Amino acid sequence: MEAYRNRVIESLQLLGDIRNQLFTQIVNIASDGELKDILSVFEEGDYYDFEMDQFENSSDVNIVKLMQLCKEIEVAFDSIQNVNAVGDEEIFLSAS
């Protein structure tokens, strides 16, 4: 049963990584599209932390589709985590 649980935890880690990569692509698409003018005021080396809700009202169909996918991944992640009683610390410890 331990091998099964480890595979579930690996799956959660993978889902988390995929969700993060999708969000990075959402930011990249917005940076070259809808947010291009806004982001042009930032200088090289500046840091800004984007949040999902900043893209909720996007008119870019690609961003909308990727946002939907991110949300579906989050729902699946939460469900699998809850059904298997996997703590956040188990996911992060296994990823190290």
Image: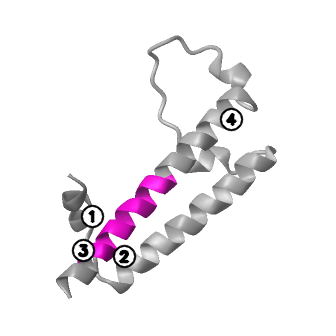
Residue type indicated by callout 4: Ala
User: What residue is disc 3 on?
Assistant: 6
| Mark 2 or mark 3, earlier in chain | 3
Q: In which quarter of the image is the N terminus?
A: bottom left
* x and y, in percent, of residue 83 in the image: 37, 85
Looking at the rendered structure, the kind of residue marked 3 is Asn
Question: What's the CA distance linking mark 1 and mark 3?
Answer: 10 Å
Residue kind at label 2, given as amino acid type: Gln
Q: In this view, does 58 lie above or below 65?
A: above
Residue that sits furthest to the bottom in the current view: 1
- The residue identified by callout 1 is 91
Residue bearing the label numbered 4? 30
Q: How crowded is mark 3: few (under 14 residues within 10 Å), some or many (20 or more)?
A: some
* N-term mark: 1 or 3: 3
The answer to whether marks 1 and 2 mark residues whose Cβ atoms lie closer than 8 Å is yes
Q: Which of marks 1 and 2 is nearer the N terminus?
A: 2
- Residue 59 is situated, as x and y percent measured from the top left of the image, at 81, 45
Main secondary structure along the magenta-highlighted residues: helix
Q: Is residue 90 magenta?
A: no
Which contiguous range is marked in magenta? 6-19
Is label 4 in contact with label 3 (beta carbons under 8 Å)? no
